[in-house]
Image (spheres, rainbow, N blue to C red):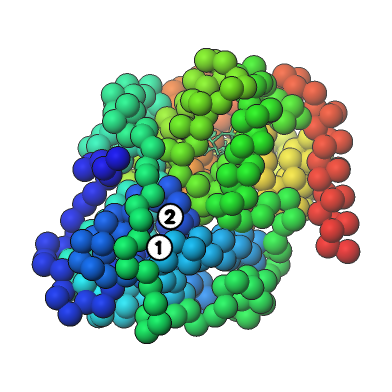
Amino acid sequence: MAIQAGRIRILKEAEPRAAGRYVLYLLQQANRAHGNPALELAIEEANRLGLPVLAGFGLLDGKNGFPEANARHYAFLLQGLADAASGLEARGIGFCLRKASPARVAIDLARDAALLVLDRGYLAIQKRWYDEIVAAVDTRIVQVEGDVVVPVEVTSPKHEYAARTLRPKLHKHLDDYVAPLTARRVKHPAGRGLPTSEVDIADPAKVLAGMSLDRAVGPVRRFTGGETEARRRLKAYLAGPFADYGSDRNRPEAGAASHMSPYLHFGQISPVEIVLAVRAAKAGGAEDKASYVEEVVIRRELAMNHVHYTDGYDRYERAVPEWARKVLAEHADDARPKTYTETELAEGRTHDVYWNAAQAEMRETGYMHNHLRMYWGKKILEWSPTPEEGFARTLRLNNRYFLDGRDPNSFTNVAWVYGLHDRPWARRKIFGTVRYQSENSLRKFDAKAYLRTVEDLCRAEAGDKA
Ligand SMILES: Cc1cc2nc3c(=O)[nH]c(=O)nc-3n(C[C@H](O)[C@H](O)[C@H](O)COP(=O)(O)OP(=O)(O)OC[C@H]3O[C@@H](n4cnc5c(N)ncnc54)[C@H](O)[C@@H]3O)c2cc1C
């Protein structure tokens, strides 16, 4: 099946360089060897030109590390890269990891490339890399979107107001974009003489040990990175827990969530592959399938839309809509029954045992269920001295501890706590007309069972590390 034209953007119109020794693919967002349209396009081009494909990766380290990334994030990323590199090798594709910025790696390796293929992300730092690459590389550059179902600009040319405005626009394109991607056969396997990696990625723990980074937040045992693990989890999920997604997706203790978010964040699985598998699943009825597609396509791509069309999506004054900032300011002086410092929050030392448990799950295991993330975020707003401070701390905690943090979904959902993509509700203290979430939301599931689950999860993390 051809790659949909809407996924492909020509960033530099030029003939492929005749003296090029390979087609370079900067594998930076879609960290996988299968189900990756950018990689398949690179293979098509290389086959046509009679060349091998070289996949490059720039690993940011030390002072120049990826913003807010720590040992937890890097461990998962490196496990995923080890898996991708072995998948690439099995397909006859070269892999070259260098400890430098992705833009630097692309610019250096592109000197010997016939053409350069990029995949695509929407964060400001990624957009800066693309600008640097386009300014410095003089051969043809093609960018291929593989980490959303429908490319953001195809869905909408502007910032969308809410899920209800995005939904019909996105649904119009679903049939065109939810299609299987066949693996192209590599006609000219990478041999000797191509640039090779600076580190042995087959040993990700050793690479991690050699990096200069924030180790205060350590790797977790609950999640292992990589596309193989992502597919194994998806298969097990769809064969069982998914059957209750429609009815139980808001019950954190029920185990009906898929835990796909870390894998999606690191590009270790394609959302199209997930949707195809969900549609084909034997377990689960129409309601479960529709519910899941609503989350993984509509809600997730609403986040991409927000980040793509909002300069300063990480800042309160840019990310939070004006009506919400206005009412929150009107209530900024309301007495807060409780306030906590960021350290007390991080350590889970509040009066609310359920909130503390959610914080422990996040801090110790890198994950939290969506229903609790909403409660967690709304309580930080309530317990912070000002809404601006609440927003900043929520984002810091979110991005520090979650494996899926630092994602468009992170910035968008933290802003949702403060009114983004929502409407005004009844007025009350502190929140004004921004949606409030009370302790009653804990009654909608078996909160005591959730406490036990978190204890078990934390014990497993501690035990494994002892
Ligand atoms: C305050 C707050 C902070 C959040 N921070 C993040 C974050 O840092 N990174 C992140 O990926 N998600 C974040 N979310 C969204 C959501 O909670 C997670 O994506 C979801 O819980 C991940 O678990 P799962 O894969 O088991 O979800 P499932 O329920 O199995 O859903 C499947 C997929 O759908 C998508 N999805 C589910 N719920 C949402 C949602 N509300 N918005 C957008 N996409 C969704 C995710 O890609 C998810 O992997 C946040 C939500 C809130 C309220």
Label 1, secondary structure: give it: loop
The relative height of residue 421 versus residue 307 in the rendered view (above or below) is above
Residues at badges 1 and 2 in contact (C-beta under 8 Å)?
yes
Write down the residue under mark 2. Answer: 30
Q: CA distance from mark 1 to mark 2?
A: 6 Å
Label 2: how many Cα within 10 Å (few below 14, some 14–19, many 20+): many
**Looking at the rendering, which quadrant does residue 450 occupy?**
top right
Write down the residue under mark 1. Answer: 27
The relative height of residue 102 versus residue 452 in the rendered view (above or below) is below
Q: Which mark is residue 326?
A: none
Amino acid on which the number 1 mark rests in the picture: Leu
Residue ID at (84%, 51%): 460
Work out whether residue 182 or residue 167 is closer to the camera in this orientation and state it: 182
**Looking at the rendering, which quadrant does residue 437 occupy?**
top right
Q: Quadrant of ligand 1?
A: top right
Residue ID at (47%, 56%): 32
Label 2, secondary structure: give it: loop
Residue ID at (21%, 77%): 20
Residue 260 picture location, percent across and down? 58, 41
Q: Is residue 79 visible?
A: yes
Left or right side of 87 for 356 = right
Residue ID at (64%, 17%): 247
Residue 53 picture location, percent across and down? 34, 67
Amino acid on which the number 2 mark rests in the picture: Ala
